[in-house]
Image (cartoon, rainbow, N blue to C red):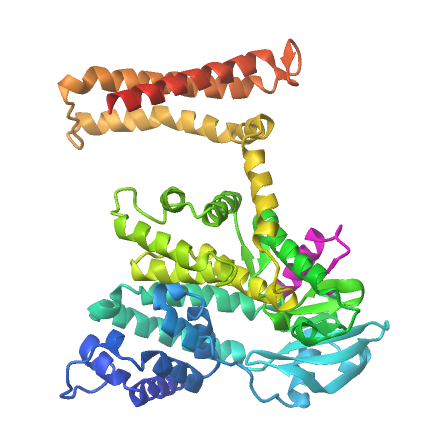
Amino acid sequence: MDREAKKRMREITATLRKYGFGKLLNKGIKNKIFPAKEEEEYSLLNDPELPVKLRLVCQDLGTSFIKLGQLLSTRQDIVGEKIAKELAKLQDDNPPVSYEEIKETVESELGANIEDIFEYFSEESLSTASIGQVHEAKLKTGEKVAVKVQKQGITETLESDLVIMKHLAQLVHKHNDELRGFNLPGIIDAFDHSIHIEIDYINELLNMTQLASNFEDDESIHIPIAYSKYCTTKVLTMEFIEGTKVSEVFVSESEEFDKPLLAKRVLDSFMKQVLLDGFYHDDPHAGNIFILENNVVCYIDLGSMGILDEDFKKNLCDLLMLIAEKDVKGVINQFIYMGVLDYDMDTTDLKRDLRDLFFRYFNSEVGGLNDILDKLLALMQKHGIILPNDFVTMARSISMIEDVAIGLDPNVDIMASIEPIAKETAKERVNISNFINDKKGSLLYYKNMLKSLAPLLVRTIHKIENGDMSLRFELDHIDRIVSKFSLVVIIAALLISSSLVMTITRGPMLWDMPLIAVLGYFVTFILGLIGIINYLYAR
């Protein structure tokens, strides 16, 4: 470490010691950070003041640790409900930096004098956060814009703090049994990834462009225009939004706001982002949504977006429908299918707690889907189950958007926005044309898989001959094994050959598909059904 890094390390360790964490580190990492002292036995996790202490440590240590605390506040399934709620109180608002510093950054990044780019540029900031601040301006071409400018030295500070965070996380993980289950190195790695996305404003530019494209045919949703010519990693120039914050609409009595309509538009647009596009605003609180003329909904502050792949979107639709139907067994099976739960895990207590959760909270008079998801995260944490980060981020975002919708219309039903999309997604999955199209896209995978079988078999035989591998068969089961394997091979061959035949455009056709391919799929289905029946009968 250089001199500055060592100085920062001393500052961090002194702050940790100030709030009582010296006891933990003395015990946990064997005096590698702090001098050894005679101290009473100390259990960090049993300390009732732990949530407040963690928040104060993050607040005192500045930007990097505030951002880390905010990330942890979204992972209730890891840190628990109390810590998550306390860390959610962290504020990253800082006093604005001087106009001279902002001007210097803008001119350095855009390569021109600020007067040559902007007709005017406000010296007063509109808003200030720990990483950057926003100024009102007007381009020479006449457009009124908001310019987000990153504060100087932020990148260097973050990089230095990340090195120290990783060092401390590795030491605690290695030497402290009490905290090993939290996987602190993994948490810091996730933070490293997210914070680098946030400090690169080009990512927000791309997010704005993509989200605008996703809603280009929907006039009820607006995404601020980004002026890419005046954007860099540290400067983001975008349309100045002149509307009303949705938090102000909550209490407004003006007839210009159709609150039930706005609640529906907010929910419908967000569920489209999550369940259809798989690209959604992951911080949609009331301060990040504006209402424009004609009840148009506008999303702002798009620096961080959630991204879901196709499989996860489908699984999520299924899971939300099962939750809506209060199907405890279905939710358990879906979590097993998604790899959240092990197949052989004893789920007796989990099922009991889920039944209790659905009974108590799935009532509009008690709470909505956001309450269900919050309690579900707490329940998973209680049972030591780590949910995928995608699910946790999505659940937090849905909770936020439902709060916004309820603020507009207390009688809104979030499931009314989810069910049509979820059912349509489920219908598409059983559509034979979509199924076959998926298989067409997988032909290259199947071909490569078959090509790899021969060399794999040769390598395996070579290992057996050299004594590197041994095979042992239970002779009384060999016939059954051969029979099942033969059936699998036949089914695979039929499936692949039928998929190859799908490329034929001549000859007898059925449902706009080659007849021979349809017959091949039909036979494959029958053989698969026979295999399932035999398996169930054998059990």
Q: Is residue 223 above or below residue 536?
A: below
Residue visible at 47% across and 26% down? 447
Q: Quadrant of residue 245?
A: bottom right
Q: Quadrant of residue 515?
A: top right
Q: Quadrant of residue 440?
A: top right
Residue 29 visible:
no
Residue visible at 23% across and 67% down? 174
Q: Position of residue 95 (x, y in %)?
A: 58, 89
> Furthest residue to the front?
365
274 to the left or right of 463: right
Residue visible at 54% across and 58% down? 306
What range of the chain is rendered magenta? 203-225
Residue 385 visible:
yes
36 to the left or right of 493: left
Q: Position of residue 423 (x, y in %)?
A: 57, 40
Q: Is 177 covered by the magenta stretch? A: no
The residue nearer to you, when weighing 432 against 539, is: 539
The residue nearer to you, when weighing 24 against 379, is: 379
Q: Position of residue 300 (x, y in %)?
A: 66, 68
Question: How many discs mark residues in the rendered view?
Answer: 0
141 to the left or right of 530: right
> Furthest residue to the top?
508
Which quarter shows the N terminus?
Answer: bottom left
The residue nearer to you, when weighing 349 against 111, is: 349
Q: Is residue 154 above or below residue 256?
A: below
Q: Is 210 covered by the magenta stretch? A: yes
Which quarter shows the C terminus?
Answer: top left
Q: Is residue 421 above or below residue 191?
A: above
Q: Position of residue 20 (x, y in %)?
A: 27, 86
